[in-house]
Image (spheres, helix red, strand yellow):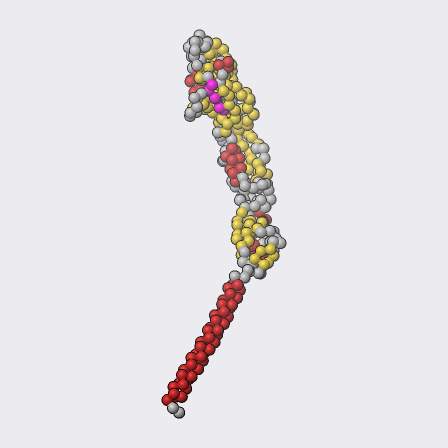
Amino acid sequence: MNMKDRKSGIGFSIASAGEKMQQSGFAFFIYALFVILFMGLICVAVFFASVKGEEEVMVPQVVGKELSDALLEMQVKELYPKIILRYSDNPEDKGLILDQSPVAGSIVKAGKRINLTVSRGTVVDKVEDFKGWNIDDVKSHLKTLFAAMSKPLITLAEPLYEYNAAEAGTVLSQNPPAGKSISDPIVLKLVVSRGPENEKITVPNIVSLSLREIYSQMASSDLMFDFSAGETDANEPQIISQMPIANEVLSKNSRVEAVIGFPQAKGLSSTVYGIFKQTLPEYAYPLKMELMALPPSGGKSSSVVKFTHMGGSLSIPYAVPKNTVLILYVEGKEFSQITVRPSED
């Protein structure tokens, strides 16, 4: 073989090897691409498998069932309960499911939280001892205790009042007695003190007393004063007569009539004289009352007089600037109000 043929053979071998390498590289590229695509498909499949929604289930009916039974049913459905405790009207509801959300029959995904409202029983399960309490405090206590309940467990009957050495308004006895278990709504009956029987009061001499002195007498006396208007030559209001007269003996909370003389209006005086009158319910014992005055310019109200009263006809003399608002409070609650006008003097 000459040199020319040898060079030609070498050239052919190199060209052939190059073609094989090109074919082999292309095959490797195709193979690599196939592997990448295959792995990509696997990743996509795994991703969608992982984000696939939970199994849908139907929410069971658990209202009225014991909490333990409800939890078992939730577990079977792969639902997770959220417990909410609440007082209920019926003592027998304790531990029972009162409400659920979502409602029974709803289709939800497994793993969803279901709100379960569970009864923790009643606010109280026994009758309290109210002996020695003031009747008004008992009423306020029961109202607050059962404010969130549609039907209170304890309803207060009209109290029975009797004379007693205890302070008026004090609870003497109760039925049912303290400590009695409450299984159903009950009616609480109370016996309440009227105060000492036939306690006697000597009528004070109030003639010539000024308005300020009358207020002091009203605040300290166990008598009720009925005022009517008269006239006086004095420059300030004062009592000009009373009935019964001083030093007579009356039963506690009896009424004393008094005529208060008001001076004649002079010039451009802004003071208005008059008598605040109101008809109240009849009370079994004296209640705490207060007459407040709100000035015409607004601002803070001030106390005119504090006193106790059995109800019925009520009258209180006043001397205030015109357009003053007079407000009557009974046991701390507003009962009525008037705006004082010049024509009321």
Residue 324 is covered by the magenta coloring: yes
Residue at image point 51% right, 33% down: 136
Residue 203 visible? The answer is no
Residue at image point 48% right, 29% down: 332
Residue at image point 44% right, 17% down: 321
Of residues 217 and 3, the one drawn nearer to the viewer in this rendering: 3
Residue at image point 49% right, 18% down: 340
Dominant secondary structure of the magenta stretch?
strand
96 w.r.t. 8: above or below: above
Count the marks: how many? 0
Residue 198 is covered by the magenta coloring: no
Residue 19 in picture, x, y percent from top left: 44, 79
Side of 161 where 272 appears, left or right = left
316 w.r.t. 47: above or below: above
Residue 175 in picture, x, y percent from top left: 57, 39
**Bounds of the magenta segment:** 323-328
Residue 344 visible? The answer is yes
Q: Residue furthest bottom?
A: 1
Of residues 85 and 230, the one drawn nearer to the viewer in this rendering: 85
Q: Quadrant of the N terminus?
A: bottom left
Of residues 70 and 180, the one drawn nearer to the viewer in this rendering: 70
Of residues 298 and 140, the one drawn nearer to the viewer in this rendering: 298
